[in-house]
Image (cartoon, rainbow, N blue to C red):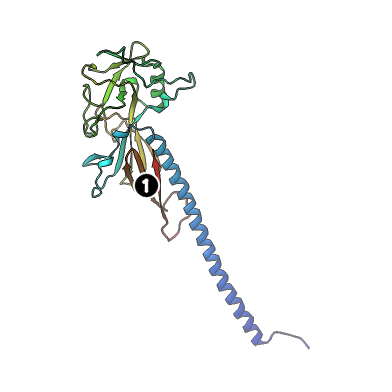
């Protein structure tokens, strides 16, 4: 006599297998969705953190009173930015931290940041330990990082009372006068001399400490593709703008939905929000988005 499954047994087994298959498929689907969510979130977290760090590295070397929130209609100092205005970029003057830290040829700063107030006159300032000559250490560093040179640079005296609307060039005005915060300089005949470009230091309040700047920076979202860019190598004190043809730009992150900056005293709180449409990620029907904040001193 041959043994076989009864019809009832077969129906019972098929029913159990169907239940297991349904539950298993749901479990696999949930695991897959969790994997997608984790992968996208991790990539977004790492890319946003990298973008934040690149911005922080440059913004930490800012002339603090120079930071503005701007759009195509105008600008305000970041501390005076209005909540009801849609600002599309943040701009600031960055001092030359690269030359100030020195270089491979010398551990000493290329510009010392100090003025010998007893030796200055209206035609030049003395900055002991600095190298303001054409093709000197400052000039070499600037040329390595940009299409600019020492003749595009300006100095800013620490302690100067400033007006963000008029003292940095954000209004598109080129400066060759001595009554603004940024003082354009020329290549010096002697190493430690700061020579004014097109004016003298007559009537200027000269302070013991200064910062040297050769570029402004801007961060903004391109409305054509929602990409976040860093702009540099432009000089507002010469009438330059962030969107001039010779201004350089670097892609920081793709598909950024929001960028906000808030001034809290001398500290800046920066926020970047991004969605999941980032090149190279695993795609999904669901929308993933994150916002990350960073405090910049």
The residue nearer to you, when weighing 290 against 80, is 80
| Residue 268 image point, x, y percent | 35, 41
Asked if residue 173 is positioned above or below residue 261 in the image, the reply reads: above
Residue closest to the far front? 118
- Residue ID at (48%, 57%): 37
Residue closest to the far bottom? 1
The residue pinned by badge 1 equals 271
The kind of secondary structure element at disc 1 is strand
| Residue 222 image point, x, y percent | 32, 44
Q: Quadrant of the C terminus?
A: top left
Q: Quadrant of the N terminus?
A: bottom right
Can the viewer see residue 224 in this picture?
yes
- Residue ID at (49%, 21%): 104
Quarter-of-image position of residue 217: top left
The residue nearer to you, when weighing 270 against 31, is 270
Q: In the figure, is residue 243 to the left or right of 48?
A: left
- Residue ID at (29%, 28%): 235
């Amino acid at each position: 006599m041959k043994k076989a499954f009864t019809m009832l047994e077969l129906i019972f087994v098929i029913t159990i297998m169907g239940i297991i298959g349904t539950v298993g498929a749901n479990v696999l689907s949930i695991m897959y969705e969790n994997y997608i969510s984790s992968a996208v979130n991790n990539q977004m977290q790492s890319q946003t953190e990298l973008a934040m760090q690149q911005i922080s590295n440059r913004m930490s070397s800012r002339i603090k009173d120079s930071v503005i929130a701007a759009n195509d209609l105008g600008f305000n100092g970041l501390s005076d930015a209005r909540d009801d205005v849609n600002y599309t970029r943040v701009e600031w003057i960055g001092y030359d931290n690269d030359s100030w830290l020195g270089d491979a040829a010398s551990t000493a700063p290329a510009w010392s940041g100090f003025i010998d107030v007893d030796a200055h006159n209206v035609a030049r300032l003395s900055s002991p330990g600095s190298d303001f000559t054409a093709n000197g250490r400052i000039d070499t560093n600037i040329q390595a990082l940009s299409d600019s040179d020492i003749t595009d640079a300006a100095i800013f005296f620490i302690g100067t009372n400033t007006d963000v609307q008029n003292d940095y060039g954000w209004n598109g005005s080129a400066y060759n006068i001595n009554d603004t915060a940024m003082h354009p300089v020329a290549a010096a005949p002697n190493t430690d001399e700061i020579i004014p470009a097109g004016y003298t230091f007559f009537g200027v309040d000269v302070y013991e400490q200064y910062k040297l700047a050769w570029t402004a920076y801007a961060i903004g979202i391109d409305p054509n593709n929602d990409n976040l860019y860093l702009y540099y190598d432009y000089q507002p004190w010469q009438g330059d703008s962030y969107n001039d043809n010779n201004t350089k730009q670097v892609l920081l992150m793709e598909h950024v939905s929001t960028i906000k900056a808030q001034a809290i005293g001398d500290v800046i709180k920066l926020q970047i929000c991004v969605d999941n449409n980032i090149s190279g990620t695993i795609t999904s029907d669901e929308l993933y988005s994150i916002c990350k904040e960073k405090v910049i001193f």
